[in-house]
């Protein structure tokens, strides 16, 4: 073995790379970040610039020296296996010039070059690959988030926009009546205006979430929040001949919530109930509140529809699960996300009178 300062007499890095590929059956472009050749005593006979750079050295600083300079003492045991097996793959910690740790995988195979036994090691930088995987995962998660937000936004905006269309159709019908009622038209346009405001609030909530990752919660009386949400869908219920009963009697009812988001949940559940009963002879919906164990308030939306199919019961609140022919399958998953973000719970159960009861529970605010 030559001394540390002697001229280079070892195989050139390009030759070592060729030997390594041949020994390991690799092809040009194979997945490794550097290559090193060791003799039977563990001295570095050859190292390419990429491998040296991983450790923070120039190749000239490593050639001829013991490979132990590049690994902590605890990881030198792998050299005991050299010569006992034709190949070896180990995950070990490398030691950079600045003292930092390089997590790496070392894939070693034995070759014979000009009658001399050499051990060719392919080095994979696990830290860099982990970073690249994390970046790829982050990008994929970001794309999923954008996709989910787009689907959710389309779903949530569809509700007030549909209501606006219904109210405007009512107003047009009133204009064609013989006994023209300005008051009825004014009330209908006011309702349409309220839906425009609601769509604006949904967009403001989304903008707030994107900017800060959260939405503002304030103490609210839940009963009037639900009552207002019910008013948003009254026209839809009437259009489909659904009789609605509202019993909002829970007291106390103060909760810490984002009012618009909770109204979105109620509107989602009411719309689902109306749509579930479209082909039913009996169309009755009941919206109610009650207390659970004194520190939770429960809201129920019960329908007399056909009930839930067995195949969707267990994944009802998962994304893209729907029982509607043209549904997006995001309404209930959005509702679950909202309720859970408020430290609550949402669930569904059979209605004893036929149909389904969708319920959510929220913690009461401290008095």
Image (tube, rainbow, N blue to C red):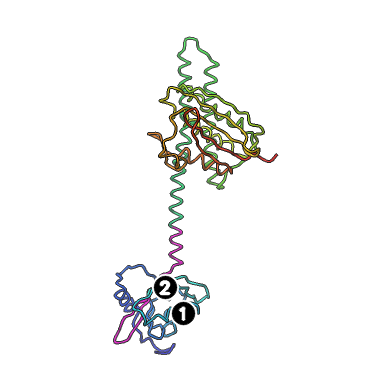
Q: CA distance from mark 2 to mark 1?
A: 11 Å
Q: Residue furthest front?
A: 352
What residue is disc 2 on? Answer: 90
Residue 228 horizontal/vertical position (percent): 57, 29
Q: What is the number of the mark on residue 195? A: none
Q: Bounds of the magenta span?
A: 108-135
The front one of 98 and 78 is 78
The front one of 199 and 90 is 90
Drawn side of residue 108 relative to residue 297, left or right: left
* Mark toward the start of the polypeptide (2 vs 1): 1
Residue 111 horizontal/vertical position (percent): 31, 80
Residue 325 horizontal/vertical position (percent): 37, 34
Q: What is the number of the mark on residue 76? A: 1
The residue depicted at 41 percent of the width and 38 percent of the height is 310
Quadrant where the image shows the C terminus: top right
Q: Residue furthest top?
A: 178
The residue depicted at 59 percent of the width and 26 percent of the height is 247
């Amino acid at each position: 073995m030559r001394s540390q300062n002697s001229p280079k007499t070892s195989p050139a890095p390009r030759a070592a790379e060729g030997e390594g590929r041949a020994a390991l059956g690799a092809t040009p472009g194979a997945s490794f970040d550097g290559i090193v050749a060791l003799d039977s005593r563990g001295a570095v006979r050859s190292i390419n610039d990429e491998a040296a750079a991983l450790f923070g050295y120039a190749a000239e600083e490593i050639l001829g020296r013991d490979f132990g300079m590049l690994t902590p003492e605890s990881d030198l045991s792998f050299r005991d296996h050299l010569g006992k097996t034709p190949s070896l793959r180990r995950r070990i910690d490398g030691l950079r010039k600045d003292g930092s740790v390089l997590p790496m995988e070392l894939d070693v195979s034995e070759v014979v070059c000009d009658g001399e036994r050499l051990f060719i090691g392919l080095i994979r930088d696990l830290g860099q690959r982990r970073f690249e995987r994390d970046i790829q995962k982050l990008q994929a998660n970001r794309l999923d988030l954008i996709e989910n937000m787009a689907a959710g936004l389309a779903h949530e905006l569809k509700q007030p926009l549909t209501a606006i269309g219904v109210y405007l159709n009512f107003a047009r019908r009133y204009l064609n009546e013989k006994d023209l009622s300005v008051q009825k038209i004014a009330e209908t346009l006011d309702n349409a205006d309220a839906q425009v405001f609601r769509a604006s609030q949904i967009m403001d909530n989304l903008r707030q979430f994107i900017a800060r990752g959260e939405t503002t919660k304030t103490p609210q009386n839940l009963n009037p929040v639900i009552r207002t949400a019910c008013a948003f869908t009254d026209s839809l219920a009437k259009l489909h001949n659904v009789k609605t009963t509202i019993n909002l009697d829970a007291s106390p009812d103060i909760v810490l919530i984002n009012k618009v988001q909770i109204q979105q949940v109620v509107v989602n559940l009411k719309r689902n109930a109306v749509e579930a009963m479209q082909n039913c002879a009996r169309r009755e919906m009941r919206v109610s509140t009650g207390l659970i164990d004194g520190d939770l308030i429960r809201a129920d939306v019960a329908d007399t529809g056909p009930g839930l199919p067995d195949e969707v019961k267990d994944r009802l609140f998962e994304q893209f699960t729907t029982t509607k022919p043209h549904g997006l399958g995001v309404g209930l998953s959005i509702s679950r996300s909202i309720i859970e973000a408020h430290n609550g719970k949402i669930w569904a159960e059979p209605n004893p009178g036929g149909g389904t009861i969708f319920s959510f529970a929220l913690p009461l605010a401290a008095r």
